[in-house]
Image (tube, rainbow, N blue to C red):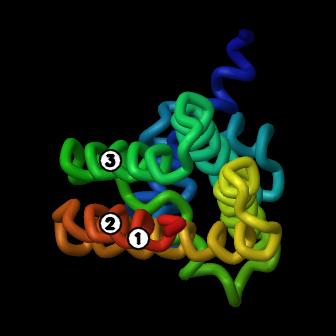
Amino acid sequence: MSTKNNSKDVLIETASRLFRIRGYYGVGLKDIIEESGIPKGSLYHYFPQGKEQLAIAAINHTKAIVIDEIQEVFDDMEDPILALQSHLDHLSGIIIKSDNIGFPIGTIAGETHSTSEPIRMACQLAFEEWQAIYRMKLLQSGYDEKQATDLGITINLMIEGAILLSLTNKSNKPLEVAKKQITLLLKKD
């Protein structure tokens, strides 16, 4: 990989982390430049439209990380309940280990939904792609199309809400509650 690609990747990774922790409006380009160690000229070379363009790249970067993490667990486990329990255990472990992880894209989504249509759309697509993974797992396990779609949305909102509450409470208890409730929701009796 060339230095140019590394510089761009470093900018995206740094922006992604800072936006997760401090939100879109809590981070300036100066912060990203200082934290990344990448020159200002490089930032504008890769992101000539500035902060909004970099934020979209950061959202897509975060989205891809989350997709990879979910898919890795789902590929290893056929049962959707066990897969989701494992996924929530993983998230719970991250929250316990780190007090500085931030919110995957919820902070940016909440801050910019009415001020930046391109960022709002990037966040919407991230949420939809995460929901699609849950939906596909449920379809593969015998749920019908409507049920799998509705449950995919419900699982995503439960996980997103549990992450927010866990971060706010500095406790993984909300994720544990979400894991229990998702298990009950998915049990076919």
Q: Of circles 3 and 1, which is in front?
A: 1
Residue 146 position, x and y percent, is: 79, 75
State left or right for residue 152 relative to residue 72: right
Instruction: Give residue 123's mark.
Output: none
State left or right for residue 28 relative to residue 170: right
Residue 113 position, x and y percent, is: 67, 83
- SS at mark 3 in the image: helix
Relative to 129, residue 185 above or below: below
Q: Is residue 50 visible?
A: no
> Would you name the residue on which mark 3 appears?
89
> Would you name the residue on which mark 1 appears?
184
Q: Is residue 145 visible?
A: yes
Q: Nearer the viewer, residue 53 or 68?
A: 68
Q: Of circles 1 and 2, which is in front?
A: 1
Dot 3 or dot 2, earlier in sequence: 3
What amino acid does circle 3 point to? Asp
Q: CA distance from mark 1 to mark 2?
A: 6 Å
Name which residue lies at 55% across and 50% down.
80
Name which residue lies at 65% across and 21% down.
6
Q: CA distance from mark 3 to mark 2?
A: 11 Å
Q: CA distance from mark 3 to mark 1?
A: 16 Å
The quarter of the rendered structure image containing the N terminus is top right
Q: Nearer the viewer, residue 158 or 5?
A: 158
- SS at mark 1 in the image: helix
Instruction: Give residue 180's mark.
Output: 2
Dot 3 or dot 1, earlier in sequence: 3
Which residue is the extreme one toward the top? 1
Relative to 189, residue 9 above or below: above
For disc 2, the neighbor class at 10 Å (few under 14, some 14 to 19, many from 20) is some
What amino acid does circle 2 point to? Lys
